[in-house]
Image: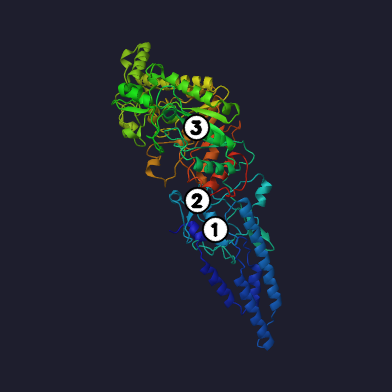
Amino acid sequence: MATDLQKLIGASEEDEDEDMDVKEEDDDDEDAIEKHLSTSPIVGVDVLIGSTSNSNRFHSYSQMQEQVGNSGGGSRRCRPLEEKERTKLRERHRRAITARILAGLRRHGNYNLRVRADINDVIAALAREAGWVVLPDGTTYPSRSQASRPVSGPSMVDTSPSSQMMIPQQTTPISPRGVSTGYRSSVEYNSCRMKGVFIPNSSPQTPAMVGDGEQTGGQALIGCSIDTLDGKQIVDIPLKLSERDFAGTAYIPVFVMLPLGVINLKCELADPDGLLKQLMILKTINVDGVSVNCWWGIVEAHAPQEYNWNGYRRLFQMIRELNLKLQIVMSFHACGGNVGDDVCIPLPHWVAEIGRSNPDIYFTDREGRRNPESLSWGVDKERVLKGRTAIEVYFDYMRSFRVEFNEYFEDGIISMIEVGLGPCGELRYPSSPVKHGWRYPGIGAFQCWDQYMLKSLRKAADERGQAFWARGPDNVGSYNSQPQETGFFCEGGDYDGYYGRFFLGWYSQMMIDHGDRILSMAKLAFEGTCIAAKLSGIHWWYRTASHAAELTTGYYNPSNKDGYAAIAAMLKKHGAAMNFPCLHSPSPDQPEEFQLTEALADPNGLTWQVMNAAWDVCLPMVSENSIPCFDWASYSRLLNRAKPLNDPEGRHFLAFTYLRLNPLLLERHNFMEFERFLNRMHGVLSLFSGEAIVDIKQ
């Protein structure tokens, strides 16, 4: 497909050969040749410009002229030695400029250019940097996200050195091909600029070739200014103006979450040898530590207060020997029913036995479907678990962990404890269960129809003096409904009426009170260690008045209320950090289920609201990626979230966790990009070497 960038770089080497043939045919006029040589522009990117073929042709021409002069067959004056010397000087000048440019690209821009790179390699790297697709045969076209936007044509500028050039606004994400370290100062920036890319263009409609050629009319130029050197035109090209410089920024420790099944159901280390190799690779690039899920369903699987920490003890010993730190997740939920779950870890067997006789210990929807992923918050104070309440069960588990691994706390190896507060370890209701048929972007369903939650609702209604409010709403649609299809969530719906505000306030407060109770126990068990709580990023239907998906999740955050301020205040009470995932804004070429337009989603708006709610009360923030990421565009978004640009108070994340360790991350290119991201999170700029990559199968 013909686009402006194809017009810019689409000229082939055949055009160059044809141009050189024309120059040979003009060798009858020596003065014209001298004029051509004296006015030929300098091109400083292509190693092959002014190549050996040019030199050979000039050498042949000189020999022919010498023979004609000796035979007396011509009356014109011949200067073969002078021409040869002039050609050699020009070749040396061009190659010196080219060598400096390519060295700068490799050293400062991290372009992975081969030793004898030519103009095609450089243009391909620049095209990939701009987000374009470059096929092995040289075919170049914009990605689907760019194809939907108008592409401006080449900039037409004056040829005088003082002319200024408009720089097109760079809006495309940075591709993993070009790697830039940014600039620490204007001096470093100027020293890293490339000089010498000149693109002649005879007409606005004709694509021009990057290389040698005389100026014929308008010129398409890449760069931002034009200089002169010995009468030759030179174009300055700044490298990667769009990438931010993170050198000298705050040090943010980066942890890598281990696979969900690193400890099997027998509480044994699943693959110690393979894991050790992977951890050694992570250590070579200065990863700060790893994050580990400690599953309630594995450790206390068979009987109350019988804890088996054997697998975790061996794992922690391995991590300590590698001098890595630990983040621990107290996982009081089941694994296997959500997106990304690749193992099945149920709740403890003895809890499941209780659930078969008393299913009301689980969250329940309006149709009576139970969700055994986690316990209902209605049993937090109910002695239904073999004589203990849910809060007592959680506290006993955390206290057992502290006693078992106290030396790791004292040595500072365990740096943070994230306390699981609900499904997926997040402080939320299981309002969107895939096993019950939910699909994005459905609004989900309220989960308050077990007898213990309804008992609390009746009590709240009685205290309000409105006994008939002791019921859940019945006009909320189904899991996959849209807000406008329901009477409760539609514009001007019941959610904003007297009963709606009462119900939503109670529903959200039950969740906040649950978090308050568990975190108070965690603070007691892990005194002296930072604790954290994780929230979920429910960004779909954020641009509606009701924020329906957030309401069913427990976040009372309609357009006229800040629902995250109360959560932040509760976390602040216990000195806990808030873990909120960095939500991604998918590009239009991603699968349909990630599209945001029809769901009226706003990941960026939600993220900034939550971050501001936390930072308004000076609450430390930690984060993790919400979807797998291996490309530099995704890493750039994570960096800009972790270290907001021009924040007046210099706020940034306390720590970051990468989800998660797998063989794909350790592939050479992906691992190099991850190392690059890690260095910028640490506030340093260093070239990645890729030397840490080894064959894991060995």
* Rendered image: mark on residue 533: none
Residue flagged by tag 2: what amino acid is it? Gly
Residue 150 placed where, x, y %?
46, 51
- Secondary structure at numbered mark 1: helix
Give the residue drawn at x 55%, y 74%.
21
**In this view of the protein, which residue sits in the foreground, 523 or 685?**
523
Q: Earlier in the sequence, mark 3 or mark 1?
A: 1
Say which residue label 1 marks: 123
Q: Are marks 2 and 3 in contact (CB under 8 Å)?
A: no
- Left or right? Give the position of 342 relative to 277: left
Residue pointed to by mark 2 = 131
Disc 3 designates what residue? 312
Q: Position of residue 553 (x, y in %)?
A: 39, 28
Mark 1 residue type:
Ile
Q: Position of residue 243 (x, y in %)?
A: 57, 45
Dot 3 amino acid type: Tyr
- Determine if residue 1 is in view: yes
Work out which quarter of the rendered image holds the N terminus and state it: bottom left
Disc 2 and disc 3: Cα gap in Å?
A: 44 Å
Q: Secondary structure at mark 2?
A: loop
Horizontally, residue 647 falls left or right of residue 310, namely right
